[in-house]
Image: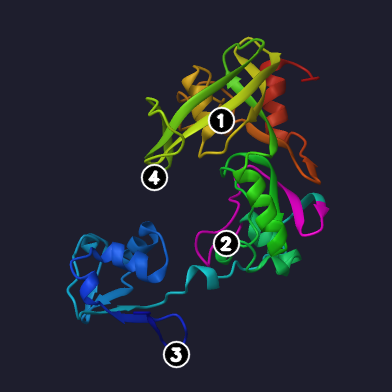
Amino acid sequence: MSAESGADGRAQSFVVDATEAGTRIDALLAARLGVGRGAARALLEAGAVRVDDRRLGRRHKGVCVAAGSRIEVADFTAPAAQRARAEPELPLAVLARGRGWIAVDKPPGQPVHPLREREGGTLLNAAIARHPELHGVGEGGLRSGVVHRLDVDTSGVVLLATEAAAWERLRGAFRAHRVDNLYRALEVGRLEGEGAAEVELAVVRHRPARVAVVERAGGGAAGGRRLAGLRWRALAIGRDATLLEVRPRTGFLHQIRATLAHLGHPVCGDPTYGAPGDIPGAPRQMLHAARLAVDEVLAESPDPPDFAAACARLLGPPPW
């Protein structure tokens, strides 16, 4: 049974059917509204959910619903219908453009896209102000046009699609591991030469996110695990740090950061995988997406000022 929309399009209500009886309220909301379990719990926490006129909160996330109960959800917009608000006052540096896509330079500390409609300050808020055609492309909603993402504190090239066909093609290239991504990573310790690493990673914490190297299960992606590989090459070596060129073969949450930490060389300034105060003067995780190439796309991002300054302090004057 589909949900009923209110007059403003933001209120939803539905009746629990027999097949759903005994389901946890957070799981039922996620299934009915087409959102993740976290988003469903956020609705509970906001007091937006009523079951038979009883308001529920986050502590009720495990409550099981009965057949025939009416569930009402206030102030809800389906994910695909949500819109990132345009913020033309935010700067946007376009590195390259082509038919159906733009490659932009993400500064450190800026999220790629908002998590809520009212959220601002993201790369997508800036891009959609210049390219309103991004709305609805790809996953749509608050991820409209986003082909791939970088961590908030990672800087560099981000690819956005302004047309659906381009999004499908470019996302397919990422899934097929055809994208040549080159990162620059300033890591703790001395690491000479070049090498490769292949580890199995799994998400061990969601908020804040953290992954860990786990024992190989003998497969590809299973049970939230992913086999992740990368190649690295030392570009410059200082007394306490090394600048690496890193090429990930696969894509997984925190892949480069977790793998380098597993090798005993965490990224300088990484609060999640490094030691507190590992390298003085690293204001954030020193990881930069410097180059992206796939099909006709070629985009390069210069080192941002904080990355260049950290390299100068730890490695000496350029070139590096």
Q: Place residue 236 in its image quadrant.
A: top right
Considering the numbered disc 4 on the image, is that residue within a helix, a strand or a loop? loop
Distance from disc 1 to disc 4, alpha carbons, whole Å, reads 18 Å
* Quadrant occupied by the C terminus: top right
- Nearer to us of marks 3 and 2 is 2
Amino acid at the residue labelled 3: Ala
Amino acid at the residue labelled 1: Ile
Considering the numbered disc 3 on the image, is that residue within a helix, a strand or a loop? loop
Residue 143 position (above or below residue 271): below
Q: Place residue 23 in its image quadrant.
A: bottom left
Residue 65 position (above or below residue 301): below
Do the residues bearing badges 1 and 4 touch, measured as CB atoms within 8 Å? no
Category of crowding for the residue at label 3, using alpha-carbon neighbours closer than 10 angstroms: few (below 14), some (14–19), many (at least 20): few
> Pointer 1: what residue?
256
Tell me the number on the disc at residue 206: 4
| The stretch drawn in magenta includes residue 148 | no
Category of crowding for the residue at label 1, using alpha-carbon neighbours closer than 10 angstroms: few (below 14), some (14–19), many (at least 20): many
Whichever of callouts 1 and 4 sits on the residue coming sooner in the sequence is: 4
Residue 299 percent coordinates (x, y): 78, 42
> Pointer 3: what residue?
7
Q: Main secondary structure of the magenta part?
A: loop
Magenta region: 97-121
Distance from disc 3 to disc 2, alpha carbons, whole Å, reads 26 Å
> Pointer 2: what residue?
139
Residue 176 position (above or below residue 16): above
- Nearer to us of marks 1 and 2 is 2
Amino acid at the residue labelled 2: Glu
Distance from disc 3 to disc 1, alpha carbons, whole Å, reads 47 Å
